Amino acid sequence: MSFLTSPEFWVALSQIILINIVLSGDNAVVIALASRSLPPKQQKMAILCGSVGAIVLRIVLTFFAVYLLSLPYLKLAGAVLLLWIGVNLLKGEDEEEELEGHSNLAAAIKTIVIADLVMSLDNVIGVAAAAKGNIVLLVVGLAVSIPLIIYGSTLILKLMNRFPVIITIGAALLGWVAGEMAFSDPAVKAFAEAHHNLHLVPPVLCALLVVAVGKWLQSRAPSASEPLEQLN
């Protein structure tokens, strides 16, 4: 249990928790949309069963991700993916699944599991990268995601709407983790070991890159009022 006194453990755990908080918004939308047509009692059952099923699948995917990220060049590819996720998080134009509400409990649970699985790639890659192969961190991070998705999604959405800076911090964190991941790829191991004093440069640059590109794209996106102004 000596790892509990390690600052690195708590820093990585904080990263995993924040990644889960920021990236759980879409999952909340999926759950709400898929279960909105059910009776109140069945809504709770759909949320519970659908979330548990999705989390079990996510655990399997995350363990595979940890293994895959140990192979050469895959961390570099994962870093690029995390940068893309972070930019889109700030851009505010994430692709949303078009889901229909189901009056059938089984159909609603199935929709929640499938949609959550498709939309959880960002969580899986982010958590696996932040855990850096530490199984204890991985398990704790996944355990934290359970109450976040089942009970905390509505609160998370409200907090993100009230304090948009949370989204910016989360996007920057994804960039930071991407930089760390790229610098730890086996393909650049020799360079990284020879230039260990530069280990903070890639995370800082990637964090700044995500925020800068995301904010720039956000500023170029047409506002909701523009189409109405053009019609007048």
Image (cartoon, helix red, strand yellow):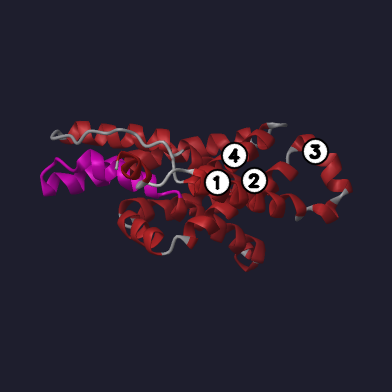
Residue at mark 3:
188
Which of the two residues, 210 or 228, is positioned nearer the viewer here? 228
Q: Residue furthest right?
A: 194
Residue at mark 1:
86
Residue at mark 2:
178
Q: Which corner quadrant holds the N terminus?
A: bottom right
Disc 3 or disc 4, which is closer to the eye? 3
Disc 1 or disc 4, which is closer to the eye? 1
Residue at mark 4:
66
- Whichever of callouts 2 and 4 sits on the residue coming sooner in the sequence is 4
- Marks 3 and 1, how far apart in space? 23 Å
- Marks 1 and 4, how far apart in space? 20 Å
**Is residue 112 toward the left or the right of residue 138 in the image?**
left
Segment colored magenta: 23-50
Are discs 3 and 1 less than 8 Å apart at CB? no
Are discs 1 and 2 less than 8 Å apart at CB? yes
Q: Residues within 10 Å of mark 4 (few under 14, many from 20)?
A: many
